[in-house]
Amino acid sequence: MELAALLFVVGAAVGSYGTLIGAGGGFLLMPLLLVLFPVDRVAALTSLSLSVVALNAGSGSVAYASQRRIDYRLALTLAVVTVPASMLGALATQFISRPAFEVLFGATLLIIGGILVYRPAPTLRQRAQAAGVQQPQNERFPLGLALSAAVGWLAGLLGIGGAPPQVVVLTHVMHVPASRAMPTVQFLVLLSALGALGIHASIGSFRLAPTRLVAIGAGAVVGAQIGATLSRRLSGPTLIRLLAAALLLVGAGLIAKALR
């Protein structure tokens, strides 16, 4: 019972903060699972993480949908390449060792966090907003599509759903405002997580742990509603800074753990 209560609190914290910054929570949850369950196989933990990510992203998407902040056309277009790529990434999880997984995970988070610190917001978009002009996305769309596919593969491999790097792709490459990008990414993460979970189920690496899934998932669903509500009170740049801080802290902690 104590473990279930702890996992509920973990899920609520991850769901709230992850939805608040448009990151789905997977990049926070997976490191915690590695600490809480040190002997479990990576593939089993990634499937659990993706299950919670799907629940959290689904809850967050419902909240954002009620606020009419999701760009469904953009999300579904990117999903054409992102979802298959996430499925391929999930397929590759079974071939990576736990220490290598932790180093790769930590390095990925540090790189993304560093990008956000170095360039917290796209200058071009800021100028356009100031002038009241919408910048076209057409010229950057092919690059955004290619990067989304790469993000999908990495997200499926790491079990994180892909929200942090997808946010970077939308805000920094495609110049989508953060206030619209983060809700849109939540919906895209839901689709990608479901695709990756399908692969885990088909290869037998998905091990249903009812206590873990229900406790963390219930907390994540509750937390996602809180995060979506709070996000309306924070500016885009503030959300980006919160995302960068979380990525750098979690990434550094993972690499330090793996190198001990």
Image: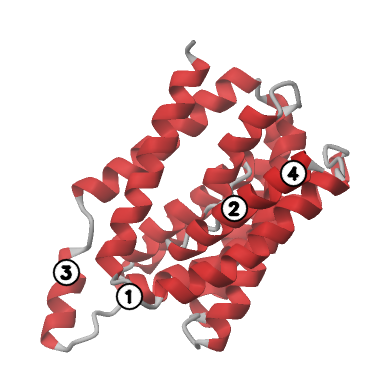
**Label 2–label 3 contact, CB within 8 A:** no
**Label 4–label 2 contact, CB within 8 A:** no
Disc 2, SS: loop
Question: Which three-letter amino acid code belongs to the residue tagged 3?
Answer: Leu
Q: Earlier in the sequence, mark 1 or mark 4?
A: 4
Residue for badge 4: 47
- Mark 1 or 3, closer to the camera: 3
Residue for badge 3: 124
Question: Which three-letter amino acid code belongs to the residue tagged 4?
Answer: Ser
69, above or below 121, in the image: below
Q: Earlier in the sequence, mark 1 or mark 3?
A: 3
Residue for badge 2: 161
**Label 1–label 2 contact, CB within 8 A:** no
Which is more toward the observer, 69 or 84?
Answer: 69
C-alpha gap between disc 4 and disc 3: 38 Å
Name the spot of residue 86 as percent of width and height, x first. 63, 50
Q: Quadrant of residue 250?
A: top left
Residue 184 can be seen, yes or no:
no
Which is more toward the observer, 138 or 60?
Answer: 60
Question: Which three-letter amino acid code belongs to the residue tagged 2?
Answer: Gly
